[in-house]
């Protein structure tokens, strides 16, 4: 499955960002730019690499010709990037995008996520950030560290964000990274929407996925982005982390 856009978060603090247009929609863009710590500048600023354009198609075309990345309000055909609906919990930012297909749909999804995410999520992120050096010292190997943090943040884990996570208590507990684990998921359909919740969760946590030749890419795309995809039978002894074996029944 091809992504319509590559999601990324840009650090714009102290950088110039062009804003063209006026009215309440331009005012909203100005507030967004300033919240990101950027400086609003005019179209002729030669240092700016990003621009928001409201109601001026010609300006959008000129800026794109200069190599400036443009967001043109209500003109997805002139957009190099689109703005998602945003949910904030301190340092945690969740962005929802439809690639310009429907801002209303993105806003509706944002509202639902707002009610779902716990209020203490920002505090948990701040605690993990403050403990970063100690976490690295405890698990110097990147993969061991990722697995340990993943297990702690999982449902019912010591840092489950929907419970009462305590980073200090977790670090003091002496818990090691999870032991190697291999699980097998039998698929009933090539449609990723037919995945069971358990299989979907396994894929989201997998370090590697072993799969048969008939398993479609749409299902493999549900695995963690940096998980290995291995079109071969699994080894007799599991490798470190979580290995998921996928194939169809029969």
Image (cartoon, rainbow, N blue to C red):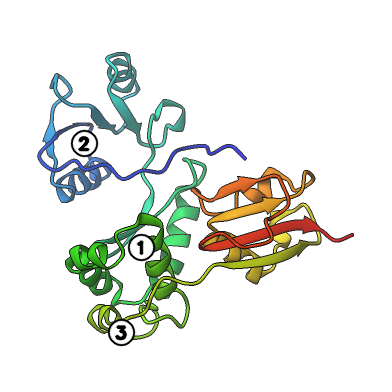
Mark 3 to mark 2: distance in Å? 56 Å
Residue 60 percent location from the top left of the image: 32, 23
* Residue at 13% from the left image edge and 35% from the top image edge: 15
Up the image or down, 164 lies above or below 67; here it is below
Q: Where, by quadrant of the figure, is residue 242 drawn?
A: bottom right
Earlier in the chain: of badge 1 and badge 2, it is 2
Element on which disc 2 rests = loop
* Residue at 31% from the left image edge and 64% from the top image edge: 139
Which numbered disc, 1 or 2, marks the residue closer to the eye?
1
Label 1 sits on residue:
145
Label 3 sits on residue:
173
Q: Is residue 45 left or right of residue 171?
A: left
Q: Is residue 231 left or right of residue 157?
A: right
Element on which disc 3 rests = loop
Residue 16 percent location from the top left of the image: 13, 32
Element on which disc 1 rests = helix
Label 2 sits on residue:
22
Q: Residues within 10 Å of mark 1 (few under 14, many from 20)?
A: some
- Residue 82 can be seen, yes or no: yes
Mark 1 to mark 2: distance in Å? 48 Å
Q: Where, by quadrant of the figure, is residue 50 drawn?
A: top left
Q: Pointer 3 and pointer 2: residues touching (CB < 8 Å)?
A: no
* Residue at 25% from the left image edge and 62% from the top image edge: 136
């Amino acid at each position: 499955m091809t992504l319509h856009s590559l999601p990324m978060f840009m650090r714009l603090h102290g950088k110039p960002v062009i804003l063209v247009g006026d009215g309440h929609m331009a005012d909203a863009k100005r507030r967004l730019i300033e919240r990101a710590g950027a400086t609003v500048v005019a179209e002729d600023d030669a240092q700016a690499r990003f621009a928001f354009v409201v109601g001026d198609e010609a300006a959008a075309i000129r800026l794109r010709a200069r190599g400036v990345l443009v967001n043109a309000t209500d003109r997805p055909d002139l957009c190099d990037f689109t703005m998602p609906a945003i949910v904030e919990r301190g340092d945690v930012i969740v962005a929802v995008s439809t690639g310009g297909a429907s801002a209303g749909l993105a806003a509706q999804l944002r509202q639902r996520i707002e009610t779902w995410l716990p209020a203490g999520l920002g505090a948990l992120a701040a605690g993990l950030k403050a403990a970063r050096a100690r976490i690295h010292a405890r698990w110097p190997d990147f993969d061991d560290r990722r697995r340990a943090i993943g297990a702690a943040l999982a449902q019912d884990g010591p840092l489950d964000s929907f419970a009462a996570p305590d980073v200090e208590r977790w670090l003091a507990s002496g818990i090691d990274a999870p032991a190697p684990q291999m699980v097998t998921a039998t698929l009933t359909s090539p449609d990723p929407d037919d995945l069971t919740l358990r299989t979907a969760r396994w894929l989201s946590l997998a370090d590697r996925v072993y799969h048969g030749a008939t398993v479609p890419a749409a299902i493999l795309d549900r695995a963690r982005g940096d998980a290995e995809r291995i079109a071969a039978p699994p080894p007799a002894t599991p490798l470190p982390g979580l290995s998921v074996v996928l194939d169809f029944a029969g």
